[in-house]
Structure formats: structure tokens, C-alpha cells
Image: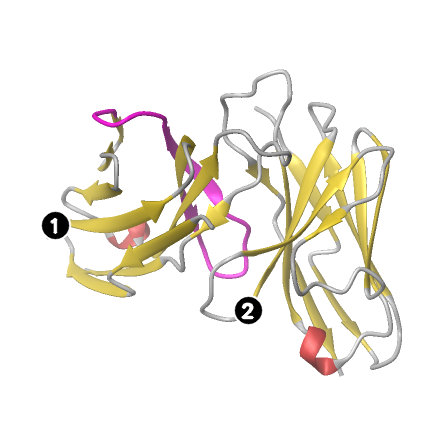
């Protein structure tokens, strides 16, 4: 079945540095991908919708200059956390749906645990 | 604004003790309601999609049902390996974000041997 791969699975970075997270659709071309953030014992909160070849759409309260999203190809979207601070430490998860099968589930990556020290 | 509320927040069961998880939703036209399982430190794993009231789907010990206001995930004779967080999500019909899901806060299920 369709698979979404996320990399890295975990990363530790120093405060003030930037971190890039990759999300790849392996079996299909995803014109749209989604980035979620999940704090401990909380549910997934949508951060932004990544659109191939155009600007991402950010949810209210999410800083677009801090969370840079690039969707340069039909199989790859990246999320860059710029000038990371400890409060950015979280579990980041991407998802995509196969546009060829619209009435199917969204596939999720395995998530990236970001720890900012 | 689409809203999803799950209850209970946590559920502890003995192995073999059947129960149900609830997902109440408010959405401006439902395209689909999704159930996912999430293990600690991992991304959600798809379980079911329900599209219309009255629909039911089953997979092993799990059965999902849907009404116009809520969905239930019934767990029959659970085993310890069913322990996980169960997430409910809805996708609204129309809109510009194809595939965008709104999640509930999840139910943490623990099944004791």
C-alpha cells in the first residue's frame, strides 16, 4: 500500500539553529501534504498544508517565517524549523493522501521527535 | 469550525473486557470520519474510514460505527497488544484543503493481562 516516509525520526539541536525534516510519498505523487505537531499526551494539531509548486497554507497562530515549508516535487515536502527554541520541541508528523484514490485514508509518516536544547 | 471530542480520555480494561470509545463531532458537511491507532513515538496507523450515518466497519477485534453526530469504536475481547492511543478525525466536505483532517484529543487505551 501507499507509504509516507519521514526523516529523521529524531533530532536534537541547539537553541538558535535550524532543523529540516523531510516527508516523502513513496508509492504515489502527492500534490498536497500536511504537517502536524503533537505535544505530549495531546492530539495532532495541523500546522500547515503543503502544496506542490505553490506556497503553503498555514493554520492560524503558526508562524510561517519560523516554520518554512517547501514542496518542490510531487513526492517531497520539507519542514524547516528556523531559529529553534526549546518551546519548539515536539513531535512533528506529516501526512499525504493519494489523489488517485480520493476516498482513502491519509497516510502518515512515522514522525520526527525534535528536541531543542 | 470543525470540532472533534473523544471520550473517555483514558480507559483501562482487563484482557477480554469489551468496551467502546466515543467520538463526537461537529463538521460542516462530513466527507469522512477516520479512526487511527497511535503507538508511543510513532505516527498514526489507519484503522477505518466511515462516510455516512449507519455505516459500520470491522477489523479483527475492532468495529467502528457512525451516526450523524458521533462514532463509536467497539473493542471486543481486547488483548494487551491493543493498548494504544486511538484517534478520531474528520474531514469536511468542500473547502480548499483536500485531505485536511481535524483530530480529537484521543483515548489512551490500556489493556491489562
Kindly identify which chain the residue marked by label 2 belongs to. A
Q: At x 56% / y 21%, what residue is drawn? A: A102
Q: Is residue B68 left or right of residue A68?
A: left
Q: Position of residue B102 (x, y in %)?
A: 49, 48
- Where are the magenta residues, as a range? B36-55
Q: Is residue A71 above or below residue A114?
A: above
Label annotation for residue B33: none
At 23% from the left and 34% from the top, the residue drawn is B65
Foreground pick, A15 / A51: A51
Relative vertical location of residue B112 with respect to residue B28 in this rendering, above or below = below
Instruction: Measure the C-alpha gap from mark 1 to mark 2.
Output: 31 Å
Q: Which residue is mark 1?
A: B16
Q: Is residue B41 magenta?
A: yes
Classify mark 2: residues with Cα within 10 Å, few (<14), some (14-19) or many (20+).
Answer: few
Do dots 1 and 2 share one subunit?
A: no
Q: Position of residue A66 (x, y in %)?
A: 82, 66
Furthest residue to the left? B17
For residue B102: magenta? no
Secondary structure under tag 2 reads: loop
**Residue B86 visible, this orientation:** no
In which quadrant of the rendered view does residue A92 lie? bottom right
Identify the coloring.
Answer: secondary structure
Asked if marks 1 and 2 touch (Cβ < 8 Å), the reply is no
Quarter of the picture containing the C terminus of chain B is bottom left
Instruction: In the rendered view, tell whether residue B106 sits above or below residue B63.
Output: below
Taking the image as shown, residue B79 lies to the left or right of residue B27, namely left
Q: Is residue B6 left or right of residue A26?
A: left
What residue is rendered at 70% in x and 63% in y?
A62
- Which image quadrant for residue B74? top left
Taking depth in this image into account, of A100 and B47 the one nearest to the observer is A100
User: Which one is in front, B4 or A82?
Assistant: B4
Q: Which residue is identified by label 2?
A: A39
Amino acid at each position: 500500500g501507499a507509504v509516507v516516509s519521514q526523516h529523521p525520526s529524531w533530532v536534537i539541536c541547539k537553541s538558535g539553529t535550524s532543523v529540516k525534516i523531510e516527508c516523502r510519498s513513496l508509492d504515489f505523487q502527492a500534490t498536497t501534504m500536511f504537517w502536524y505537531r503533537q505535544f505530549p499526551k495531546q492530539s495532532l494539531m495541523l500546522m500547515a498544508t503543503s502544496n506542490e509548486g505553490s506556497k503553503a497554507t498555514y493554520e492560524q497562530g503558526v508562524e510561517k517565517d519560523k516554520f518554512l515549508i517547501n514542496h518542490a516535487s510531487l513526492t517531497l515536502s520539507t519542514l524547516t524549523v528556523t531559529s529553534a527554541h526549546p518551546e519548539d520541541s515536539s513531535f512533528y508528523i506529516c501526512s499525504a493522501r493519494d489523489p488517485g484514490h480520493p476516498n482513502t485514508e491519509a497516510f502518515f509518516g512515522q514522525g520526527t521527535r525534535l528536541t531543542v536544547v | 469550525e470543525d470540532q472533534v471530542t473523544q471520550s473517555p480520555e483514558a480507559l483501562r480494561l482487563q484482557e477480554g473486557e469489551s468496551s467502546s470509545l466515543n467520538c463526537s463531532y461537529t463538521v460542516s458537511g462530513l466527507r469522512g470520519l477516520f479512526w487511527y491507532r497511535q503507538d508511543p513515538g510513532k505516527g498514526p496507523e489507519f484503522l477505518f474510514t466511515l462516510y455516512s450515518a449507519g455505516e459500520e466497519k470491522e477489523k479483527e477485534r475492532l468495529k467502528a460505527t457512525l451516526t450523524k453526530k458521533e462514532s463509536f469504536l467497539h473493542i471486543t475481547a481486547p488483548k494487551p497488544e491493543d493498548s494504544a492511543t486511538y484517534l478520531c478525525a474528520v474531514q469536511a466536505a468542500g473547502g480548499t484543503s483536500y485531505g485536511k483532517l481535524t483530530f480529537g484529543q484521543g483515548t489512551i487505551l490500556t489493556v491489562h493481562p
